[in-house]
């Protein structure tokens, strides 16, 4: 029913109003001290050097994406392990098939050489 979403709409408007008003207030009331030193890049106490646009290896991003992919898949095993007894035989079979599919994907990326950093 549409009227059931009225509290969600009200809360969303309150949150949006708070965010917008906080951003505007800090922008107008906050100190403005622009200087050359303040506008310089700063990271971990070390001055920046070189070009920030230097290329990264695609392998770096591939391994990062594969890590996130398999990490999220493993997260699905936690609720299953908590409810192992209540899910019974059907839950065991479902998780067994899930693990088989995850392992099949892992074997596929191993065979494709996605985790080999150097091509030798």
Image (cartoon, rainbow, N blue to C red):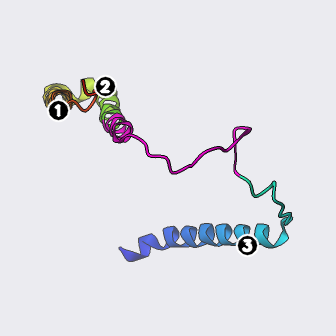
Is residue 52 part of the magenta span, yes or no?
A: yes
The label nearer to you, 2 versus 1, is 1
Number of dots carrying numbers: 3
Q: Quadrant of residue 15?
A: bottom right
For the residues carrying marks 2 and 3, which lies nearer the camera in this image?
A: 3
Residue 17 vertical placement versus 77 (above, below):
below
Left or right, 68 with respect to 7, comes to left
Q: Element at badge 1?
A: helix
Left or right: where 87 falls relative to 57: left
The image position of residue 78, as x and y in percent, is 34, 29
Q: Which residue is mark 3?
A: 24
Q: Residue at x 66, y 71 (%)?
A: 20
Give the side of residue 111 with respect to residue 117, left or right.
Answer: left
Return the x and y of residue 9 as percentages of the image width and height: 51, 72
Q: Which residue is mark 2?
A: 81
- Tag 2, which secondary structure? helix
Q: Earlier in the sequence, mark 2 or mark 3?
A: 3
Distance from disc 2 to disc 3, alpha carbons, whole Å, reads: 47 Å
The answer to whether marks 2 and 3 mark residues whose Cβ atoms lie closer than 8 Å is no
Q: Name the quarter where the N terminus is drawn.
A: bottom left
- Tell me the distance, in whole angstroms, between the alpha carbons under discs 3 and 1: 52 Å
**Image disc number at residue 112:** 1
Badge 1 crowding class, 10 Å Cα cut-off, few under 14, some 14 to 19, many 20 or more, is: few
SS for dot 3: helix
Percent of width and height locating residue 114: 25, 33
The mark lying in front, picked from 3 and 1, is 1
Classify 10 Å Cα crowding around label 2: few (below 14), some (14-19), many (20 and above): few
**Span colored in magenta:** 41-69
- Which residue is painted at 84% across and 61% down in the image? 35
Q: Cα distance, mark 2 to mark 1?
A: 31 Å
Residue located at (58% from left, 73% from top): 13
Query: Outermost residue toward the bottom?
Result: 2
């Amino acid at each position: 029913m549409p009227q059931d979403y009225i509290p969600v709409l009200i809360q969303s408007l309150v949150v949006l109003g708070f965010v917008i008003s906080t951003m505007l207030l800090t922008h107008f009331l906050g100190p403005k001290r622009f200087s050359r030193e303040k506008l310089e890049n700063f990271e971990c106490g070390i001055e920046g050097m070189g070009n920030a646009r230097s290329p990264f290896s695609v392998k770096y991003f591939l391994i990062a994406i594969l890590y996130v992919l398999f990490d999220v898949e493993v997260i699905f095993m936690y609720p299953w392990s908590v409810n192992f007894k209540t899910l019974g035989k059907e839950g065991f079979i479902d998780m067994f098939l899930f693990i088989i599919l995850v392992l099949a994907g892992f074997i596929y990326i191993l065979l494709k050489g996605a985790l080999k950093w150097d091509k030798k």
